[in-house]
Image (cartoon, helix red, strand yellow):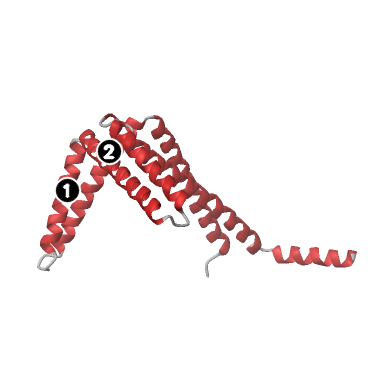
Amino acid sequence: MADPVKEGRKLHRSFSGLALLGILLVVAGLVGLVYTGVATLASMILFGWLLLIGGLVGLLHAIQSRGTSYFWLGVVVAALNIAAGVVVIRHPHGTAEALTMFAALLFLTGGVFRLVGSVVVRGPQFGWTLLQGAFGLLLGLLVLFDWPHSSLYVLGCFFSLALLFDGLGLIAIGVGGRRIVSMVSDQMAPGTDADSLSEEEQKRSES
């Protein structure tokens, strides 16, 4: 049977590690918000390497499954991922411009659909949907009008915000988990029941 104290210490260290990782992500997100150009370049290079590694792994799986009906499909998908990863790594600025244009078009179309849908349907969330549509449309226009210069900061800003919010979530999980583990460890510590019984007996004698 595992020792509850040792298990509690392991969980405490694990949650502390999560909190530390969250702090690092928050710091990286804040730095990225200050240096959005560097964050954009870093996100593109990371994206390219992820595509390249994913393509290589997919190619290995396809080779292992040769002879099946999905072999050539796996090879084609892996080759496309590898080619896309190489292009992104070699041309991060051009990739950032293309993805920024794509993001602007997504904001525009999403904003227009929300605006039209909110006016036509007029449901219980009419005001909120209308506000979301107007914000998406405005954001898409701002990014599109400033393109290609906007590609220097839009993706980096999104990447940094994702790091920031992920870091805050990990910090919350780590701190909350440490508190819960500490509470459970205190209740399961030796002598806790005796202390509680002695306190109850003192209260009874005083009454």
Q: Amino acid at mark 2?
A: Thr
Tag on residue 82?
A: 1
- Which residue appears at 48% of the width and 57% of the height? 124
Q: In which image quadrant can residue 49 be found?
A: top left
Compared to 84, does 2 lie above or below? Answer: below
Q: Position of residue 186 (x, y in %)?
A: 65, 59
Compared to 93, does 17 lie above or below? Answer: below
- Which residue appears at 22% of the width and 38% of the height? 98
Label 1 neighbour load within 10 Å: few <14, some 14-19, many 20+: many
- Depth check, front residue: 178 or 68: 68
Residue for badge 2: 100
Q: Position of residue 187 (x, y in %)?
A: 65, 62
- Depth check, front residue: 85 or 124: 124
Q: Classify residue 16 as left or right of residue 109.
A: right
Q: Classify residue 136 as left or right of residue 192.
A: left
| Label 1 SS | helix
- Which residue appears at 18% of the width and 50% of the height? 81
| Callout in the foreground (2, 1) | 2
Q: From this viewpoint, is residue 100 visible?
A: yes
| Label 2 SS | helix
Report, in whole angstroms, how far the alpha carbon at label 2 lies from the one at label 1: 22 Å
Q: Amino acid at mark 1?
A: Ile
